[in-house]
RNA sequence: GCCCGGUUCGUCUAGCGGUCCAGGACAUCGCCCUCUCACGGCGAAGAUCACGGGUUCGAAUCCCGUACCGGGUACCA
């Protein structure tokens, strides 16, 4: 039995949880679930004026929203200073670290010189005279603590994603691990905390590859076997530059606000840089499948462009496959934001045969196949709450160009009203919400219109479209009779009449302008 | 500059020496369904596998070089 795996996600709380970080968190989480290990979160708030409490909360909330919750309490690096100090002492005592008094100016000079000569700059203890250091020390001058890096040879590791990576030790040099005020630096704290927390595998962004050899040196100096490493490629924007705010939404909270479901984001992110072993697979994959198939060695080495379109598509699929009550609750929140009356107890749906819940459930059902995000619902359903304020001009021109067409619409309105009266008399009101009877009701409305259209030699589409225009103001909507049902008899007829009046007014106006008599 | 990576359809990717004149998904286009729009179904188009050399009977797959892109080069994380 091998040791239980322990992985961690270690964000620095300097802003929103970026999708790139979210993916790193996800991959760590998936790895932990897949291997039956432990997933931890460590907030790297080793101060910097940049870390904020607010960002910490945001990040934790985002993780929770995604379902990536840690298996043990969240660690805060700032609270671990005593541990860092102890390890620092150890390195100092063993001679793996030393106090460096070399002033900044001299450092800059050396760096400049190396650069001018096309050499890499790697500081070494020998570059600053021993006696001078001692003098400064005696005078109580400030100093940093440097790690004594091995001289000559190479440091190598086998990255699960990138394979064998090897660098010359002399390209690294003695690097700083603590500031003059004693506060430790990233490469050091990271190693110490990972050791202390028993991390067995470090999975993080590709930007940390160059840090890894330094960290391995510290592990060795401390006599600890380094963990495994897996680095993740970057996420790019459409212009192939590192994904940033100017590419649109990049923060997890922004996606949430956009009406993306966490499951969809997780699924999309999982497939960004990773693919299951099967050559052909269903990309919309439940979490359990993701966990079962996940492995870090199938992560791609090359950076990936974040494709908003594909995320939107996947989100639409998730909205459709998620159990209805949950979607309805989410959508109702958003509807209530625009029309607060909806959730008030005295709200009456326009079709009195339906309860508020039935009605809301019904109209949400009509939009569900036409959306990709939750935010689209209010727009998609607006005409159920407000009569159209305008009509699509092209459609008006096509379907209501003359008095004959207008009169036809007027007549159709009457046919509908009659059919509606008959249908409600015969229907069992208790079963109105039953889809089967709704279908029957639709048929009862449609039949008379079809019969009439045929007798007049009018294509059915030319009957349906003007009605659609009257009730929605648009030429695209869910199936017409479903719309009418949820809109109710009274409102339907009112809107048809409104369009008739509007069309007549428009006709005489344009006729007066052009001087032509209205064509019949 | 120097160090370290990367490069397969517009995008995400499969491919780990022959089964690939390269498979899937999104997007695009067409058809079907149809009262419109979607959903769904079917189909089409789309990649000289960055380029140039090797190795091999045989390379997208191995090696070298070039180009381009990225990361790093801190008393940031």
Image (cartoon, coloured by chain):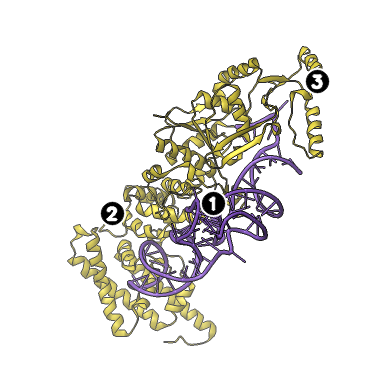
Chain colours: A yellow, B purple
Q: Are marks 2 and 1 on the same chain?
A: yes
Q: Which mark is residue A358?
A: 2
Question: Which of pointers 3 and 2 indicates the residue nearer the eye?
Answer: 3
Q: Position of residue A47 (x, y in %)?
A: 61, 28
Q: Chain of mark 1?
A: A
**Subunit bearing disc 2:** A
Q: Secondary structure at mark 2?
A: helix
Between B18 and B4, the one nearer to me in the picture: B18
State the CA–CA distance, disc 3 to disc 2: 84 Å
Q: Tell me, yes or no, whether the two marked residues, 1 and 3, touch with CB atoms within 8 Å.
A: no
Q: List x then y, in percent, for residue B52.
A: 67, 60
Give the secondary structure at mark 1: loop
The chain under label 3 reads A
Label 2 neighbour load within 10 Å: few <14, some 14-19, many 20+: some
The crowding category of the residue bearing disc 3, from other C-alpha atoms within 10 Å (few below 14, some 14 to 19, many at least 20), is few
Q: Quadrant of residue B72?
A: top right
Instruction: From the top left corner, tell me how far across and down residue A371 is, in percent.
Output: 42, 58
Snapshot quadrant of residue A455: bottom left
Say whether mark 3 and mark 1 are on the same chain.
yes
Q: Label 1, on which residue?
A: A306
Q: Which residue is mark 3?
A: A129
Q: CA distance from mark 1 to mark 3?
A: 52 Å
Within 10 angstroms of label 1, few (less than 14), some, or many (20 or more) residues? many
Q: Is residue A175 above or below residue A62?
A: above
Evaluate if marks 3 and 2 touch, with contact meaning CB atoms under 8 Å apart: no
Q: How far is disc 2 from disc 1 in space, using C-alphas?
A: 39 Å
Which image quadrant: the C terminus of chain A?
bottom left
- Sequence-wise first label, 1 or 3: 3
């Amino acid at each position: 039995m091998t040791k239980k795996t322990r992985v961690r996600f270690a964000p620095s709380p300097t802003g929103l949880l970026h999708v790139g970080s979210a993916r790193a968190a996800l991959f760590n989480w998936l790895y932990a679930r897949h291997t039956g290990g432990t997933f931890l979160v460590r907030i790297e708030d080793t101060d910097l004026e940049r870390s904020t409490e607010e960002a910490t909360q945001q990040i934790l909330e985002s993780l929770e929203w995604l379902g990536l919750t840690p298996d043990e309490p969240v660690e805060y690096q700032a609270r671990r200073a005593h541990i860092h100090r102890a390890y620092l002492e150890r390195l100092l005592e063993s001679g793996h670290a030393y106090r460096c008094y070399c002033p900044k100016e001299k450092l800059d000079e050396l760096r400049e010189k190396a650069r001018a000569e096309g050499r890499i700059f790697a500081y070494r203890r020998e570059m600053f005279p021993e006696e001078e250091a001692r003098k400064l020390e005696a005078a109580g001058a400030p100093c940093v603590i440097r790690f004594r890096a091995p001289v000559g040879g190479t440091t190598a590791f086998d990255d699960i994603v990138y394979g064998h990576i090897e660098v010359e030790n002399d390209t690294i040099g003695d690097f700083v691990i603590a500031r003059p005020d004693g506060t430790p630096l990233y490469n050091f704290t990271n190693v110490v905390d990972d050791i202390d927390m028993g991390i067995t595998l470090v999975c993080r962004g590709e930007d940390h590859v160059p840090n890894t050899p330094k960290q391995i040196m510290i592990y060795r100096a401390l006599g600890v076997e380094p963990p495994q490493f897996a680095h993740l490629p970057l996420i790019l924007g459409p212009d192939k530059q590192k994904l940033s705010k100017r590419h649109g939404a990049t923060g997890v909270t922004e996606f949430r606000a956009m009406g993306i479901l966490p499951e969809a984001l997780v699924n999309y992110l999982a497939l960004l840089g990773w693919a299951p072993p099967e050559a052909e697979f269903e990309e919309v994959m439940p979490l359990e499948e993701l966990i079962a198939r996940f492995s870090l060695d199938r992560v791609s080495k090359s950076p990936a462009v974040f494709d908003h379109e594909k995320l939107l598509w996947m989100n639409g699929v998730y909205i459709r496959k998620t159990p209805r009550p949950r979607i309805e609750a989410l959508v109702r929140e958003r509807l209530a934001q625009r029309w607060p009356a909806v959730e008030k107890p005295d709200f009456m749906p326009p079709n009195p045969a339906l309860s508020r819940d039935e009605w809301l459930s019904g109209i949400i059902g009509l939009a569900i196949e036409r959306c990709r995000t939750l935010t689209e619902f209010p727009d998609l359903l607006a005409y159920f709450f407000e009569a159209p304020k305008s009509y699509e001009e092209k459609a008006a021109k096509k379907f209501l160009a003359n008095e004959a067409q207008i009169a036809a619409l007027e007549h159709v309105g009457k046919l509908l009203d009659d059919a509606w009266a008959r249908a409600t008399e015969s229907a069992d009101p208790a079963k109105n919400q039953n889809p089967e009877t709704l279908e029957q009701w639709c048929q009862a409305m449609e039949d008379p219109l079809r019969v009439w259209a045929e007798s007049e030699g009018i294509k059915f589409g030319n009957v349906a479209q003007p009605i659609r225009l009257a009730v929605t103001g648009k030429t695209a909507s869910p199936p017409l009779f479903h719309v009418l049902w949820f809109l109710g008899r009274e409102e339907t007829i009112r809107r048809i009449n409104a369009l008739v009046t509007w069309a007549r007014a428009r006709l005489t106006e344009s006729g007066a302008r052009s001087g032509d008599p209205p064509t019949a």
